[in-house]
Structure formats: structure tokens, C-alpha cells
């Protein structure tokens, strides 16, 4: 599973068997503001949301971007994973 940027839709996507999980974003310079994440309801509870957020944070780090969580799920994930503090924007 890998997270990909879909700039045409302003979202990161994780293709899953049975649907797509995604995290919408807005760019403000070198900061990605993440206001919403979504996993198809029938696929919730399997760790796909965490895999999505981890992938977003890894992509941001690789591109030298910061992430400002505006979504409660992303905020909680970053709180529970201090190893991503360097990408908090």
C-alpha cells in the first residue's frame, strides 16, 4: 500500500481493495493543512486511516514540507507518534 498525491483533487490517496482512503489538503507555502481524512465506512477499523496519515507524513518529510493538522484524526495520530514532530507546521 502506498499513499500518492492527487494534486488535481487536492488530496492524498490510499487505494484499497473496495475503495479509496483519502486526506484532503490545502497548501500554504511549504505547509500542508490537512482538514479531513476519510476511509470508506466498510473498511474502517483495519488501520487504513493510520496507514494513510503515516504515508502523508512520510511524503511531506521527503519533500521538505510541514503538516498542520486540522483534522482530529491527524492531530491524534501526530500526538501519538512524536517521531513526526519535525514535520509539524
Image (spheres, rainbow, N blue to C red):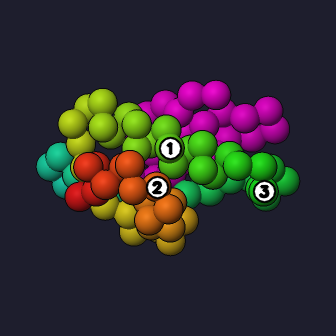
Q: Residue at x 23, y 58 (%)?
A: 89
Which residues make up the magenta segment?
A: 1-25
Identify residue for label 1.
Answer: 54
Q: Is residue 31 visible?
A: yes
Disc nearer the start of the sequence (2/3): 3
Comparing labels 2 and 3, the label whose residue is closer to the camera: 2
Identify residue for label 2.
Answer: 81
Query: Could you say which is closer to the camera, residue 11 or residue 61?
Result: 61
Q: Residue at x 31, y 55 (%)?
A: 85
Residue 3 as seen in the image, left or right of residue 20: left
Q: Is residue 6 visible?
A: no
Query: Could you say which is closer to the camera, residue 85 or residue 24?
Result: 85
Identify residue for label 3.
Answer: 45
Q: Residue furthest right?
A: 42
Determine the CA span between mark 2 and mark 3: 19 Å
Quarter holding residue 17: top right
- Residue 49 in the magenta stretch? The answer is no
Q: Residues within 10 Å of mark 1 (few under 14, many from 20)?
A: some
Amino acid at each position: 500500500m502506498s499513499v500518492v498525491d492527487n494534486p488535481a483533487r487536492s488530496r492524498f490517496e490510499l487505494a484499497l481493495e473496495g475503495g479509496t482512503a483519502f486526506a484532503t489538503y490545502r497548501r500554504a507555502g511549504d505547509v500542508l493543512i490537512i482538514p479531513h481524512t476519510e476511509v470508506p465506512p466498510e473498511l474502517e477499523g483495519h488501520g487504513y486511516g493510520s496507514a494513510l496519515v503515516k504515508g502523508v507524513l512520510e511524503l511531506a518529510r521527503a519533500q521538505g514540507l510541514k503538516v498542520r493538522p486540522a483534522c482530529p484524526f491527524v492531530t491524534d495520530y501526530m500526538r501519538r507518534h512524536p517521531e513526526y514532530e519535525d514535520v509539524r507546521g
